[in-house]
Image: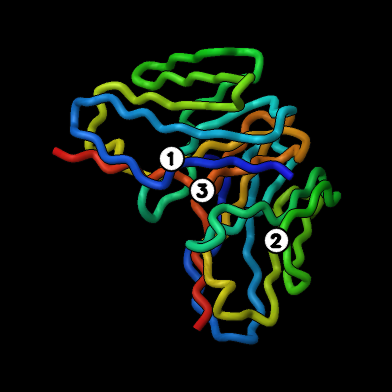
Amino acid sequence: DSGVTQTPKHLITATGQRVTLRCSPRSGDLSVYWYQQSLDQGLQFLIQYYNGEERAKGNILERFSAQQFPDLHSELNLSSLELGDSALYFCASSTEQLWYTFGSGTRLTVV
Amino acid sequence: GEDVEQSLFLSVREGDSSVINCTYTDSSSTYLYWYKQEPGAGLQLLTYIFSNMDMKQDQRLTVLLNKKDKHLSLRIADTQTGDSAIYFCAETGSARQLTFGSGTQLTVLP
């Protein structure tokens, strides 16, 4: 157990739908990062939050959004889903941008 | 922007050494990492090296860093079948978050 918890582990949904992925960071970590892993794009950085505030944005689509709550857990919202959004979504947390600990991921399948 | 490159595949015999190579472009990289991903699993941090170091050894793992050539390598001694996985090189530099290479699929043959 890495200390970073992601739910759900698997998600199957239809095109056009909206889903929410949840991440609880390791105790004491203030930063949360979201990554998308797909076969054709590899591991792509989506977005980072630090202590509730958005810190950095990567290749995140406008259909996707995220937030970090006062208890530091984070949610990634994916809307108007397309087949190409099928991927593994990882959350990572870190302290002082040194130790990045990853959760086991949420596998999203859009049918 | 930052770019990290790795070869896609490596096959070795059990008991041999494996060397996985990585090149990066961000000269402001401060930390460089090696992660391991087994099938259906998340990313496990194997080791890291600070940019002012040339080498780091941790049991069967040896990391070499050539900062001039922006080249990083991971050597796994006495490779076992359980080492079969995808290995990702990653760095943090000016982007201030992890940038990953495409991953190297290591296959260990009996």
- Residue at 68 percent across and 48 percent down: it is A33
Of labels 3 and 1, the one closer to you: 3
Label 2 element class: strand
Crowding at dot 1, Cα within 10 Å, few <14 / some 14-19 / many 20+, comes out as many
Q: Quadrant of residue A4?
A: top right
| Chain identifier of the residue bearing label 2 in the image | A
Q: CA distance from mark 2 to mark 1?
A: 27 Å
Q: Which residue is mark 1?
A: B87
- Nearer the N terminus, badge 3 or badge 1? 1
Answer left or right for B52 relative to B8: right
Label 1 element class: strand
Give the numbered dot on residue A75.
2
- Residue at 18 percent across and 40 percent down: it is B109
Query: Which residue appears farthest toward the right when viewing the image?
Result: A53
What is the three-letter code of the residue carrying label 1? Answer: Tyr
What is the three-letter code of the residue carrying label 3? Answer: Ser
Where does the image place residue B76, in percent across and percent down from the top left?
34, 25
| Chain identifier of the residue bearing label 1 in the image | B
Where does the image place residue A75, in percent across and percent down from the top left?
70, 61
Quadrant that contains the C terminus of chain B: top left
Question: Are callouts 3 and 1 both on one chain?
Answer: yes
Q: Are marks 3 and 2 in contact (CB under 8 Å)?
A: no
Q: Which residue is mark 3?
A: B102
| Chain identifier of the residue bearing label 3 in the image | B
What is the three-letter code of the residue carrying label 2? Answer: Glu
- Residue at 72 percent across and 28 percent down: it is B27
Crowding at dot 3, Cα within 10 Å, few <14 / some 14-19 / many 20+, comes out as many
